[in-house]
Image (spheres, rainbow, N blue to C red):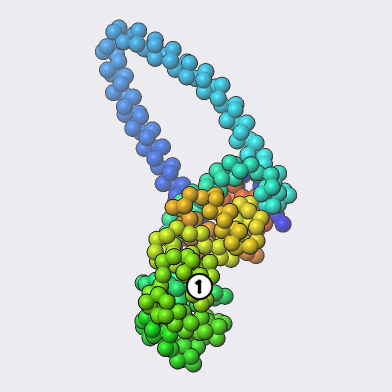
């Protein structure tokens, strides 16, 4: 394991460079604007100087009071920030699990939301990477994605969706033909059973339509909570946390939870984030897990979350070495 560097010495992430330059552009523009405003103010002041003397004194007095107040608050703020950094640093040496035990609830919520904001800046394009146009297509694609990759599934589904356009088509599918069509996604026998069963259940109980409620979705063959939340969040606009392999793994690395059961991880994350963000939090964490925080060799030295992550150092911290580990999904950009 590489030894962790201090937050101040951490490298600039190639993932966040564009977001940072956008942020730094604003202060520059603001400072230019202030300079222009300042010149005009000086000219006006030189003309009206005597009348304004008393007002100017009052303003100066106010500034002094404000400075004193700020000076009083500053040490308190610094101390709080130092405490948080120290907590993360000490937990880092003991592992993410220690942070879960030691971090106060409010600090955890703040840190988790800060991490999500950084991920939002880093992956503004985060989305469900399965191709679909209807709830049925998304349900089928999600069933096929088990033990497979979204890329592989997206290569398989165009022909599949054309051959089986509705629930009745899956219900009456020829088993051998369907197996052949989805063979490349792996576990094709089980998946064929699920797809035929899905078609039959939708026709028998839901008028051939995919239902928009979690309690109905989880009764369908091949659909568990994870798949149900993917369908709700992306086909029906109902917020949901999807705990797939990436979300579970990264939630533990981030020190958000030490739970290993997906349903319990889902409950923890639902408590950390506001409901409207649930679907996008899942997409952003999945994007980060696929591109930067890999299972075997996370790109810590190029990670935008380095300063807030108790697992910093699990992967290479050298910026050049880490940058080479960053991968980008097809069609998704950096
Ligand atoms: S890449 Fe490293 S620093 Fe970034 S989230 Fe993963 S473990 Fe933490």
Q: Residue at x 28, y 18 (%)?
A: 43
Decide: few, some or many residues near mark 1? Use Cα within 10 Å; few <14, some 14-19, many ≥20: some
Q: Is residue 101 visible?
A: yes
Quadrant of the rendering where the N terminus is positioned: bottom right
What is the x, y in percent for residue 265?
Answer: 60, 58
Residue hosting label 1: 219
Q: Residue at x 27, y 17 (%)?
A: 44
- Residue at the image point whose x is 48% and y is 49% from the top: 274
Numbered circles on residues, count: 1
| Front in this rendered view, residue 152 or 137 | 137
User: Is 74 left, or right, of 44 in this rendering?
Assistant: right
Residue 163 % position (x, y): 38, 86
Query: Could you say where residue 318 lies in the image, as x and y percent from the top left?
Result: 63, 54
Q: Residue furthest front?
A: 205
- Describe residue 36's horizontal placement relative to residue 116 as left or right: left
Q: Residue at x 48, y 16 (%)?
A: 65
Q: Secondary structure at mark 1?
A: loop
On the question of residue 122 being in view, the answer is no
Is 71 located above or below residue 194 in the figure?
above
Q: How far from the left and from the top, in percent, is residue 78?
A: 60, 31
Q: Is mark 1 within 8 Å of ligand 1?
A: no
């Amino acid at each position: 394991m590489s030894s962790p560097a201090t937050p101040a010495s951490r490298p600039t992430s190639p993932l966040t460079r564009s977001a940072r330059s956008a942020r730094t552009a604003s202060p520059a523009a603001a400072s230019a604007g202030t300079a222009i405003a300042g010149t005009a103010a000086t000219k006006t002041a030189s003309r009206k100087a005597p009348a304004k003397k008393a007002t100017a004194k009052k303003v100066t007095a106010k500034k002094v009071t404000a400075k004193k107040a700020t000076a009083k608050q500053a040490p308190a703020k610094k101390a709080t920030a130092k405490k948080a950094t120290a907590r993360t640093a000490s937990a880092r040496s003991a592992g993410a699990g220690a942070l879960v035990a030691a971090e106060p609830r409010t600090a955890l919520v703040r840190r988790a939301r800060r991490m999500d904001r950084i991920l939002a800046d880093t992956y503004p394009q985060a989305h469900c990477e399965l191709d679909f146009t209807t709830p049925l297509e998304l349900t089928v694609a999600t069933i096929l994605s088990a033990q497979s990759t979204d890329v592989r599934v997206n290569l398989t589904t165009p022909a599949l969706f054309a051959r089986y356009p509705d629930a009745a088509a899956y219900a009456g599918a020829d088993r051998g033909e369907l197996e052949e069509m989805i063979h490349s996604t792996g576990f094709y026998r089980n998946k064929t059973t699920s797809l035929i069963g899905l078609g039959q259940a939708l026709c028998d109980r839901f008028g051939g339509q995919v239902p928009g409620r979690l309690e109905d979705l989880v009764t369908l063959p091949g659909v568990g909570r994870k798949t149900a939340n993917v369908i709700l969040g992306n086909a029906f606009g109902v917020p949901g946390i999807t705990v797939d392999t990436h979300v579970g793994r990264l939630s533990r690395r981030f020190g958000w939870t030490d739970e290993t059961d997906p349903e319990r991880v889902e409950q923890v994350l639902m408590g950390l984030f506001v409901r409207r963000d649930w679907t996008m939090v899942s997409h952003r964490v999945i994007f980060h897990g696929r591109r930067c925080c890999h299972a075997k060799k996370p790109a810590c030295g190029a990670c935008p979350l380095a300063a807030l992550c108790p697992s910093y150092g699990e992967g290479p911290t050298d910026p050049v070495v880490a940058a080479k580990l960053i991968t980008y999904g097809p069609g998704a950009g950096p």
